[in-house]
Image (cartoon, grey):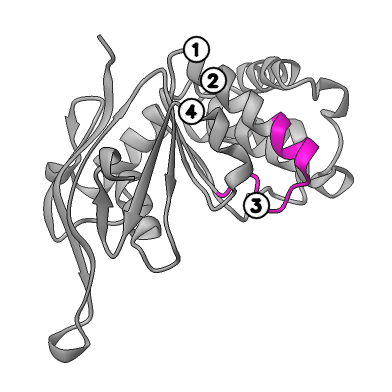
Amino acid sequence: MDTIAISCRNVKKCYGENECRIEALKGIDLDIYSGQLTLMVGPSGSGKTTLLSILTTILTPDEGEVFILGHNVSTMNDNEKAMLRRNYLGIVFQSLFLIPTLSILENVALPLLVAGKSEEEANERALNTLKELNMAQRADFSPSNLSKGQQQRIAIGRAMVNNSKIIVCDEPTSSLDKASGLEILSLLRDLALASRAIFVVTHDHRIFPFADRIITMSDGLIIPENDI
């Protein structure tokens, strides 16, 4: 039976007050499973970014509960949420946030150093991750020396180096050509096959065939899959 990696129950989020009040999420019920590549699609303003921020514990819902690998995020303080992100979540932001003054190896090793690993262990594990990505030969390069597709691979490597059980990506192929985009999706599919939960927010229709599941949002709600 598939393991539920992330579960939302009646999650609601509003912005503003009184006549300016906007309901970004209107009661989201959602399960995301380990071993699957799940895509979330929908027009701008549908609530995707708000939900993504809640699923990664960056934003707190006004109502409802979120469980990550069985842990009730709704009862956690900020330090506990940070610990949960560090131990279980790998996040690939749309802007990547690679540090330009660090080498590729140092960028990938950074989460391990933050987690308290020694520099020797962090670099060894980062190098092994680069080997998995076929990027070890560029370990000493700076991010500016890489193509956009290669930079995206490094951002994914940084997200997976801590053996994260869940990897969340925001528009990982939006700025890539077809060949580079297919390489990234092939990598994400491999990670899903390794029993990770891969959750991708995207507008890129080219990657739909790679998904195990496609979730559509509209006006703060998830459209039932049998209605799509």
Residue 116 is labelled as: 4
- Crowdedness of circle 2 by 10 Å Cα count: few (<14), some, many (20+)? many
Residue 50 drawn at (x, y percent):
34, 59
Over which residues does the magenta segment extend? 171-183
Q: Residue at x 63, y 42 (%)?
A: 206
Secondary structure of the residue carrying numbered label 4: loop
Between label 4 and label 2, give the one nearer the viewer: 2
Q: Is residue 136 left or right of residue 209?
A: right
Type of amino acid under label 2:
Leu
Q: Earlier in the sequence, mark 4 or mark 1?
A: 4
Secondary structure of the residue carrying numbered label 2: helix
- Viewer-closest of 74 and 49: 49
Q: Classify residue 86 by image quadrant.
A: top left
Residue on which disc 2 sits: 191
Mark 4–mark 3 Cα distance, whole angstroms, equals: 34 Å
Q: Residue at x 29, y 39 (%)?
A: 225
Mark 4–mark 1 Cα distance, whole angstroms, equals: 25 Å
The reply to whether residue 103 is visible in this rendering is no
Q: Quadrant of the N terminus?
A: top left
Type of amino acid under label 1:
Ala
Between label 4 and label 3, give the one nearer the viewer: 3
Residue 194 is labelled as: 1
Give the answer, above or below, for where 114 lies relative to 161.
below
Residue 173 drawn at (x, y percent):
65, 45
Q: Is residue 177 left or right of residue 58?
A: right
